[in-house]
Amino acid sequence: MSDSRVVLSVGLAKLLHELGIDDNLRAEFERDPRGVLQRHGVEVPPGDFKVHLPSKEDLQKGFAGFLDSALKNPIMAMAFGHGGHHPHH
């Protein structure tokens, strides 16, 4: 996985987490999804698009699954501050 994909994945994970708990961000995302995505480092192709956010509960479950999977990857674990496994130490 390239460094840019790690950053993108972490940015998206943080956004998913925030969308699962922050009503103000959810409202802003529904008004201006492009702006919110760009602020979180996600390139959005030109053109109009609509978004439909899942419930906060569904997003929380999805984020928990993503985080569980990500923490099994040493690079992602480091990105989330969990250090990962270092066999040479």
Image: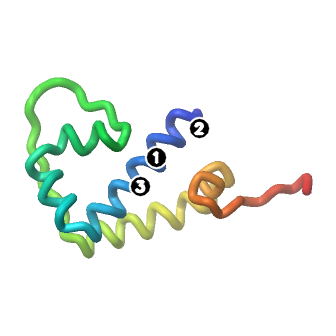
Above or below, 26 against 60 in this view is above
- What element does badge 1 sit on? helix
Locate residue 34, reporting x and y percent.
Answer: 19, 38
Q: Are marks 1 and 3 in contact (CB under 8 Å)?
A: yes
- Position of the N terminus by quadrant: top right
Amino acid residing under circle 3: Ala
Residue at horizontal 36 percent and vertical 66 percent from the top:
62
- Dot label at residue 13: 3
| Amino acid type shown at disc 1 | Ser
> Mark 1 or 2, which is nearer the eye?
1
Q: CA distance from mark 2 to mark 3?
A: 16 Å
At 28% from the left and 67% from the top, the residue drawn is 20
Helix, strand or loop for disc 3: helix
**In front of the other: label 2 or label 3?**
3
Q: Position of residue 73 (x, y in %)?
A: 63, 54
Residue 70: image location, x then y, percent: 55, 58
Inspect the image, locate mark 2, and give the three-letter code of the amino acid beneath it. Met
- Badges 1 and 2: C-beta atoms under 8 Å apart? yes
- Residue 9 — which label? 1
Location of residue 63 with respect to 86 vertically, above or below: below
Q: Is residue 49 left or right of residue 13?
A: left
Q: Quadrant of residue 56?
A: bottom left
Q: Position of residue 4 (x, y in %)?
A: 52, 33
Q: Distance between the Cα atoms at labels 1 and 2? A: 10 Å
Left or right relative to 4: residue 81? right
Identify the residue shown where x is 28% and y is 70%: 21
Q: CA distance from mark 1 to mark 3?
A: 6 Å
**For the residues bearing labels 2 and 3, Cβ distance under 8 angstroms:** no
What label does residue 1 carry, if any?
2
